[in-house]
Amino acid sequence: MSVLTPSPSIPRHGLFYRLTRNKVGVAGFIIVGGIIAMTLIAPLLLDTSVPGDAQNTWSGPSAQHWLGTDNAGKDVLHQVLLGGGTVLFVGMTAAAITTIIAVVFGALAAYLRGPVDSFLLQATDIVMTVPQIVLLAVLGSFFQLTSPTVLAILIGCLSWPILMRSIRAQVLSLKEREFVEAAKLLDLGTARVVFAEIVPNMAGYILINFIIAVTNAIYALVGMYVLGLAPLAGANWGIMIRKAWTYGAMSLPEGTLFMMAPVAMIALLQLGLIMLTRSLEEVFNPRLAEG
């Protein structure tokens, strides 16, 4: 943060105390940390090809298969443990793209105003009015969306307009503050004033919205698989749900766990992400930290 930025009040407690002060937030960190650890460790310990057993399809829970098997005799627990990597990668990458675009466009639009503001707002309106499901269906018919990176870029480039408008509103408020006026008088230049003086003052707001963008990106990714807009290549929780739907797992008592296990993992991850924002608010909101 620049020297022109007003010094925040000195907190009575350290960062670790404020991160762990809210029990709900701590539980969120534990849940998300556990799922991330699982996605990193599982590929090192398990066979990533997930071998099937044609003689043991749609079997229920047993000592050998704790969550049963799917239509190809593949172990459900094995797939659950390996299935979070792509979901987390796409969610976080897409959220990073969304946040960067929204912060850059929103901050510049609010600070410069005039034609730049009008142009960026018009671009925002256009992106918001494009039916994303139809666009994704068209792109899916022309391109093979097999790469998680391509999926993340696609989701990230379509998800920034709402956050851009929120960032713009925040910057419109901050640009009237004294430290911004001082930076202008020193002729520090637009880039430095915006990205070194104004944006750091929104760090907490941006970080919490990044977490929310992760949850939205994960929902978008799973939705693409369920609707058949992305090919069923690889193994992740979204593909498991699509296969469960395709092969009628919900009509088979033995297929219930194959259907519900990835749904439960996605719900648990989303819950953890939302819960950990409680601790982030404690860190970045001085009034909550001192309360």
Image: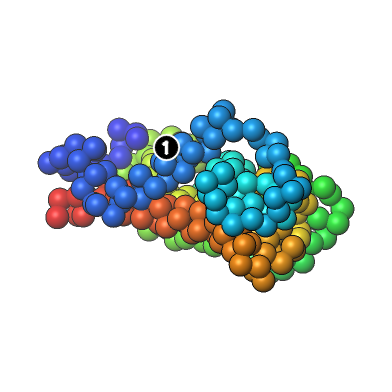
| Residue at 19%, 54% in the rendered image | 287
Q: Amino acid at mark 1?
A: Ala
Q: Is residue 172 left or right of residue 125?
A: left
Q: Position of residue 214 (x, y in %)?
A: 52, 51
Q: Vertically, is 137 above or below 189?
A: below
In what quadrant of the picture does the N terminus appear? top left
The answer to which of 214 and 3 lies nearer the viewer is 214
Q: Position of residue 280 (x, y in %)?
A: 32, 48
- Res. 101 in view: no
Q: Secondary structure at mark 1?
A: helix
| Residue at 78%, 52% in the rendered image | 231
> Which quadrant holds residue 58?
bottom right
- Res. 14 in view: yes
The type of colouring in the image is rainbow
Q: Vertically, is 67 above or below 19?
A: below
The answer to which of 87 and 90 lies nearer the viewer is 87
**Crowding at label 1, few (<14), some or many (≥20) Cα neighbours within 10 Å?**
some
Residue on which disc 1 sits: 196
Q: Is residue 215 left or right of residue 247?
A: left
In what quadrant of the picture does the C terminus appear? bottom left
Q: Residue furthest right?
A: 142
> Which quadrant holds residue 250?
bottom right
| Residue at 42%, 37% in the rendered image | 196
Q: Position of residue 118 (x, y in %)?
A: 61, 61
Q: Residue furthest top?
A: 44
Count how many numbered circles sit on residues in the image. 1
| Residue at 72%, 43% in the rendered image | 52
Q: Position of residue 193 (x, y in %)?
A: 43, 40
> Which quadrant holds residue 140?
bottom right
The answer to which of 276 and 95 lies nearer the viewer is 276
